[in-house]
Image: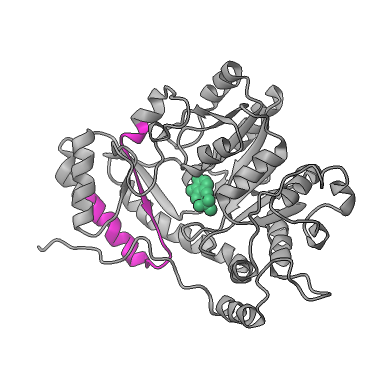
Amino acid sequence: MAERCFRGNFTQQEAIPEEAIARAVEVLRGGRLHRYNVPDGEAGEVALLEQEFAAYQGSRYCLACASGGYALHVALKAYGLAPGASVLTNAFTLSPVPGAIDNAGGRPVLVETTEDLVLDLGDLEAKIDSSGARLLLLSHMRGHQADMERLCTLLETRGIVLIEDCAHTMGAAWKGRRSGSFGLAACFSTQTYKHINSGEGGLLTSDDPDLMARAVILSGSYMLYGRHKAAPPAEAYADIALETPNYSGRMDVLRAAILRPQLRDLDRQVARWNERYRAIEALLQQSPALYLPVRPAEEGYVGSSIQFLVRELDGSGCAAFQRACRERGVALKWFGEPLPSGYTSRHDSWRYIQAQSLPVSDAILARLFDMRIPLTFSLQDCRLIAEILLECLAAFGGTCGEPAAAQ
Ligand SMILES: *Cc1c(COP(=O)(O)O)cnc(C)c1O
């Protein structure tokens, strides 16, 4: 039998909805693209997006800005991170996270990951003690959430402030409570590969008036903060407006205009992602050679990507498996690759931070694969992809055994 190949494109997102395109064209015709360039009496697309996202999150305030990484930077600065202060964060995350800590003048202290790809709470506790850090920038990397109740209890007892990086958990929840509602602030990305797409963009949410007032000024509001709809009242700015720098990084009207219809559709999209995720997961789970991170019942996730560990393969086996998949049209990222390609999620490729010993994470990343699940894939595509993965694995697994027959 000829080998089946997959012909889809793993980086192809869906088209922007027609309603968003129509609104974008209207915005362009009007020529008013700056967020504060609004006709009298109108709120403007950016302020409305902030209001709508705050309502979606159940947060008091929201600030739209230039990128997810920028939102992280502004959150850290608005919190008042002291120069040189240690910030606890995940060893397994994406480079904008340590980058934002560095940009805010902090020093990342990396915490080990578990095989379920969440923060290791035992290592967190040890590093709270050893680092003296007062802040955790928690990255829900690839949408995996730690036990948020246990984590919050630990942080509370130890007096540690939490800021959440929700780049992969927009639309997700823990026990029905929105991801991003557990800490002092949360940061989201609207970059093309996240859950709503404006090319670039970020959203920062918080219930804290002081933090949000500083964030609004930092984002470059000049003295126009009164035009925000999901921000604290004017009094909150009295003492800080002239003492807070402008780190210009606003969101423009065009991006807000195309995000608003996508936000209204987000929950439906989440359901579509999860159907696809579960179709792939169900097949991959049949292979004893693979470990798929456990998704606890409390976790309401968004399956926009899937990860799995290959139990038995060594470095050259992993490379050969990845190559075989690529030849059959299945694009996998392998976190064990010695040199980063495409993106970096390995702490040893962030050489601007102090080198740190993370043997557990290193051993996990060495066997960890990652695959995007764009919504342009049908359920049938997803099943074909999973079958190809299993076939390639059987060819390279050696000791891995045959994958069970697909149902
Ligand atoms: C994408 C991403 C970010 C930052 O988003 P940008 O909008 O690209 O700056 C932060 N954290 C994680 C885990 C991400 O994947």
Residue 370 colored in magenta in the image? yes
Residue range (magenta): 364-391
Q: In the picture, which quadrant includes the C terminus?
A: bottom left
Residue 326, above or below 314: below
Q: Nearer the viewer, residue 196 or 276?
A: 196
Left or right: residue 325 versus residue 377 is left
58 sits to left or right of 203: right
Q: Position of residue 297 (x, y in %)?
A: 54, 44
| Left or right: where 388 falls relative to 45 | left
Compared to residue 92, the image places residue 171 above or below, namely below
Where is residue 139 shown, x and y percent of the image?
54, 40
The location of residue 371, given as percent across then percent down, is 36, 51
Q: What is the residue that sits farthest to the left in this orientation? A: 1
**What is the x, y in percent for residue 404?**
23, 48
> Can you see residue 302?
yes
Query: Could you tell me which residue is drawn at 41 percent across and 55 percent down?
Result: 278
**Residue 335: quarter of image:** top left
